[in-house]
Image: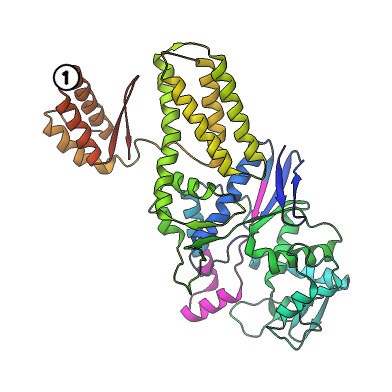
Amino acid sequence: MLKFYDSYSKTLIEFNYTGQINMYVCGLTPYDKAHVGHLRTCLAFDSIKRLLIKSGLEVQHIQNITDVDDKIIKRCKETGTDPKVLTETNHNEALEMFDKVGIIRADVYPKVTLHIKEIIEIIQKLIKNGYAYQTKSGVYYIVGKFLKYGKLSGQNLDEVKDGSRLEVDETKYNPEDFALWKNTSGEIIEFDSPWGTGRPGWHIECSAMAGKYAKKLHIHGGARDLIFPHHENEIAQSEGATNEKFAELWLHTGFLTVDGEKMSKSLGNFITIDKIVNKFSKNAIRFFMLNSHYRSPVDYNEAQLEAASESVERILNSIGLLREELKVKLNGPDANFKQETNDLVKEIWSYLRNDFDTPNALAKLFDLVRVINKHVSKEKIDHAQLLLLDSGLQNILWVFGFEEENKLSGLDSKKSELEEIIKEFGLKTKSKPDEMIESLIELRIDARAKKDYKKSDLIRSKLKEIGIIIEDSSSGQRWKVE
């Protein structure tokens, strides 16, 4: 049974659905390069989506693109860039970075600029239902009329009013009312509407696009800084227009901080995704992010990212060892091993299904790896259980997004260095780098058989210098690219 903490009700609720579910996650406002805070949120929801899929659900994932916004307009005025070019360039680059971390793309990426019709229609419904009014500066939502306003964020109307006075608009009836449509004249991005030329307010965009692509919204998510005012206003707009519950479940991710501070350009701690993706492996990034609960803050730490790579390697190496030992060792059914490992697998899934508790699930995964490693060191091993564990581990690793690296990747760049090592040991060069490695391993095996450990160690050392690691096991020697 899946359970998630609902930000709206502030309780852990059971997620009882079958078939297709709709998940809307607030996406980027691509006025600049995406940063690791965006990556944290997208990676968390990617992993949650993976869990939903492995739980037998079909997920329609909708993630909007806010391609019209004050920040976009400001940047285009500063640089002379066309808004369409700016937003598409930054968003496409972000998607490429997300691809490198194994984030499964959304099914739909709706753009605000292509959904003005739907935005106008929902504003018209709000006016008709008495939740909105027009002034000379635009159209505004009547916050005081929506009695459930503040339930998501926990704010009362007096607190909202106090905050609204910081940005006074004399044309509004009430200071807390927010813009659904902003009138403009000669702006670089503007659209025709029944209320004059202008552009939509930020919040109405998501209400309109979520309503178009999901008649029933099962999950709405985003970073926790969107709870107020963005998601609070989405609820007010959507329910004011339809008189129906907007979303069944609200999920929010914790902040990503740098040295305990929320990332911002003004503090100089702004880290773009390309910097982390080009420095650390996909597995390392995913482990680092998922080793904290999705609702908790994550403090960016490069030392922990380095350690994360080694942690995932331990898991993957254990699976590789399991498969190799199956080839060479005799079968010996072990009831205690079977019971212990089955229990650990159940515990992993139990943690994942209980509000996606990845830190505890990972801890149990390492317990499972230790038990497997101990078992495969025996003379006889339980073939049937190990085969089941191999299959079961693939499902668990898929949810985390960990992937076994292709050991041939990156070898072409090492070809010239391998040729030098081959020549140093008097061997013939080969056309393929992996063939040269295998020749060196054969030479090392021969040296060990002749008790020439100096030569054996030298071969291993030379390969390690160029990033190729030789590992000894009871079933033989394995190699991998570091």
Residue beneath disc 1? 451
Query: On the picture, is 297 further left or further right than 16?
Result: left
Q: Residue at x 51, y 77 (%)?
A: 76
Say if the magenta span includes residue 68.
yes
Q: Residue at x 38, y 53 (%)?
A: 279
Q: Position of residue 116 (x, y in %)?
A: 70, 68
Q: Position of residue 146 (x, y in %)?
A: 84, 69
Quadrant placement of the C terminus = top left
Q: Quadrant of residue 73?
A: bottom right
Q: Residue at x 54, y 72 (%)?
A: 83
Query: On the picture, is 43 further left or further right than 229?
Result: left
Which amino acid type is shown beneath numbered disc 1? Lys
The crowding category of the residue bearing disc 1, from other C-alpha atoms within 10 Å (few below 14, some 14 to 19, many at least 20), is few
Q: Quadrant of residue 355?
A: top right
Q: Position of residue 347 (x, y in %)?
A: 62, 33
Please give the count of numbered marks on the rendered protein.
1
- The local secondary structure at tag 1 comes to loop
Q: Which residues are magenta?
A: 60-88
Say if the magenta span includes residue 367.
no
